[in-house]
Amino acid sequence: MVERGKQIYSIHCTFCHGADARGGSGGPNLIRTAVVLNDKDGELLGPVLKEGREGMPKFDLPASQVSDIAAFLHSFRVGGYDISRMAPPTILVGDAQAGEVYFQKTCTSCHSVANDLKGIGGRITDAKRLQQTWLMPGATGGRGGPAAPPSPGTIVKVAVTQGGKKITGRLVKIDDFVVALTEDDGTPRSFTRDGDAPKVELIDPLQGHRALLGKYTDKDIHDVTAFLASVK
């Protein structure tokens, strides 16, 4: 159960709560929470996963998987920080060559180690930060969780119905009445909205990363991190 729970936890929870359940990218420490401390077999953890919490997505998992996650969380020793921490001394344990193969197959449609990722291993020397940077740049959502809506600063496409002209730029403001953006040359533009006119398309630049979060295996993540660390 612990091994199964570890695998399920690594897919849905690690990104926010950390591999050792002591907090990660925006998620709190789970080890000493009242829910985990008082839970026995997932009976308290299950409703939290199903209903979610503020800033936390909902997970529709079967009871057996909830029990497995609970078994994994209960496998951590509850004590002082040092004795209960299970973080490895380094996360650079992957195969850089295998990571390069995976990168070439999966990532090169958007990224290149000769351009946007040039020298990334020399620029980001902290392995954990490097891993988080490529997994989900600037993200606070959990691995495998639903995508958050694009925020101001995200590229937004605006299709103006008059003449069929399409204007693109960076989102400044959007609500039911107006959409404002800044074009690539710095020109500010704003449009009054009337229902679906003009047509507004929000483009999330991290959608490709979000789509892959639930597909990576632990080996994929370790291998790609090791490869990027070698790109000096």
Image (cartoon, rainbow, N blue to C red):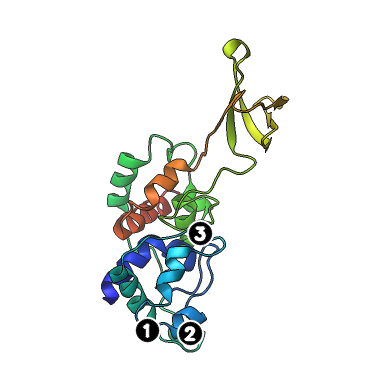
- Residue 18, relative to residue 230: is it above or below? below
Seen from the viewer's position, the closer of residues 221 and 139 is: 139
User: Neighbour class for label 3 at 10 Å: few (<14), some, many (≥20)?
Assistant: few
Q: Which mark is residue 64?
A: none
Amino acid, disc 1 = Lys
Q: Is residue 85 left or right of residue 69?
A: right
Q: Are marks 1 and 3 in contact (CB under 8 Å)?
A: no
Seen from the viewer's position, the closer of residues 164 and 23 is: 164
Element class at badge 1:
loop
- Residue 209, relative to residue 7: is it above or below? above
Q: Choose the circle earlier in sequence order: 1 or 2.
A: 1
Q: Choose the circle earlier in sequence order: 1 or 3.
A: 1
Percent across and percent down for residue 119 are: 48, 46
Q: Which residue is mark 1?
A: 40
Element class at badge 2:
helix
Amino acid, disc 2 = Asp
Q: Which residue is mark 2?
A: 82
Amino acid, disc 3 = Arg
Q: Are marks 2 and 3 in contact (CB under 8 Å)?
A: no
Residue at x-position 57% and y-position 63%: 54
Q: Which residue is mark 3?
A: 129
Residue that protrudes farthest toward the bottom in the picture: 79
